Image: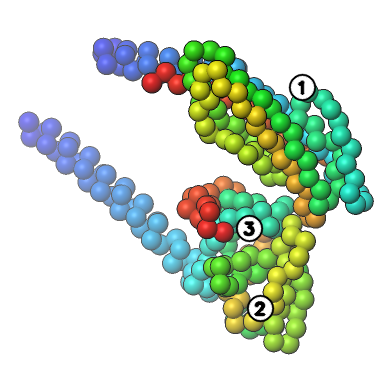
């Protein structure tokens, strides 16, 4: 009887540790990334095909924060805030006060935006965007019909 | 081996068999499109055994249809899954629905070539599952 209780207790502690570890990961990863990438929004899910084929619907991308407007270059893929929420498009023109973006798969360019609306730019490695396919699918389904 | 283990193995075996049957019975269509240079180019390929969208230039689109009829006595659940490079370009107008007995439905496969598409052949597959709805 005593051995059975001991076994049960051991298994319970194991489960508590496992759940605690998972919760730590879920809580810690975004905060860790936020610190490393110097942005409030270190991750984003791609919810449309406007940047196809560079970014695909359902991709999870990493965003690097920017401090100065000089850090934004032509052809960078940036994330900015607008009335619809967030948009992830490519920079096609840099003006003094504003910048113009366009989705690679779109025919029309976006309205000019202010530099202060830019949240960050897509994190790239060896000129390739860092993306995790399908991991952003949850966000795609939550936002279905909204965008 | 305990009785419960044996029952679980039998249930698992039946489920695995059902999955294999569905995979074998699924309607499988290969999809292909040739993205070509130029404007307003549309070369139609009227093949019935595959969803061939022919030659298309950027900013062009085309729709092909597949008709399904439930001839049996039980309704079937239709689910279509796209694979391959072409799958990002193709939209299925009706998916994940129940087809009642005797009912016929036309599913549209619409392709749209965005301006960022490369001049090359995009291909892939669509697998359409027809799962009988017994309950």
Q: Secondary structure at mark 1?
A: loop
In the rendered image, which residue does mark 2 sit on? A113
Q: Secondary structure at mark 3?
A: loop
Residue B75 seen in render: yes
In the rendered image, which residue does mark 3 sit on? A130
Q: Is residue B75 left or right of residue B65?
A: left
Residue at 60% x, 23% y is: B104
Question: Label 2 crowding class (10 Å Cα cut-off): few <14, some 14-19, many 20+?
Answer: some
Quarter of the picture containing the C terminus of chain B is top left
Disc 3 and disc 1 on one polypeptide chain: no
Residue at 33% x, 18% y is: B8
Q: Secondary structure at mark 2?
A: strand
Chain hosting mark 3: A
Residue A147 image point, x, y percent: 57, 59
The answer to whether B103 is drawn above or below residue A90 in the figure is: above
Residue B25 image point, x, y percent: 60, 17
The image quarter containing residue A93 is: bottom right
Residue at 58% x, 55% y is: A47
In the rendered image, which residue does mark 1 sit on? B49
Between marks 3 and 1, how big is the CA–CA gap?
38 Å
């Amino acid at each position: 009887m005593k051995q059975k209780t001991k076994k049960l207790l051991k298994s319970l502690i194991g489960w508590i540790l496992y759940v605690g570890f998972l919760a730590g990961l879920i809580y810690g990863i975004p905060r860790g990334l936020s610190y490393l990438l110097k942005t409030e929004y270190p991750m984003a899910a791609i919810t449309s095909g406007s940047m196809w084929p560079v970014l695909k619907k359902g991709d999870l991308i990493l965003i690097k924060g920017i401090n100065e407007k000089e850090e934004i270059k032509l052809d960078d893929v940036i994330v900015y805030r607008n009335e619809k929420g967030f948009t992830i498009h490519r920079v096609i023109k840099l003006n003094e006060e504003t910048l113009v973006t366009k989705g690679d798969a779109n025919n029309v360019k976006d309205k000019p935006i202010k530099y202060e609306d830019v949240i960050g730019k897509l994190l790239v490695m060896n000129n390739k965007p860092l993306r995790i396919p399908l991991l952003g699918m949850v966000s795609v389904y939550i936002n279905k019909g909204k965008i | 081996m305990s009785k419960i283990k044996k029952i679980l193995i039998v249930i698992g075996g039946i489920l695995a068999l059902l999955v294999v049957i569905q995979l074998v019975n699924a309607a499988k269509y290969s999809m292909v499109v040739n993205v070509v240079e130029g404007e307003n180019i549309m070369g139609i390929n009227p093949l019935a055994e595959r969803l061939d969208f022919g030659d298309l230039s950027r900013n062009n689109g085309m729709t092909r249809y597949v008709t399904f009829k439930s001839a049996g006595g039980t309704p079937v659940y239709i689910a279509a899954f796209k694979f391959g490079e072409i799958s990002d370009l193709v939209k299925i107008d009706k998916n994940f629905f129940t087809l009642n007995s005797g009912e016929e439905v036309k599913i549209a496969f619409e392709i749209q070539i965005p301006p960022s598409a490369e001049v090359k052949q995009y291909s892939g597959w669509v697998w359409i599952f027809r799962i009988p709805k017994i309950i």
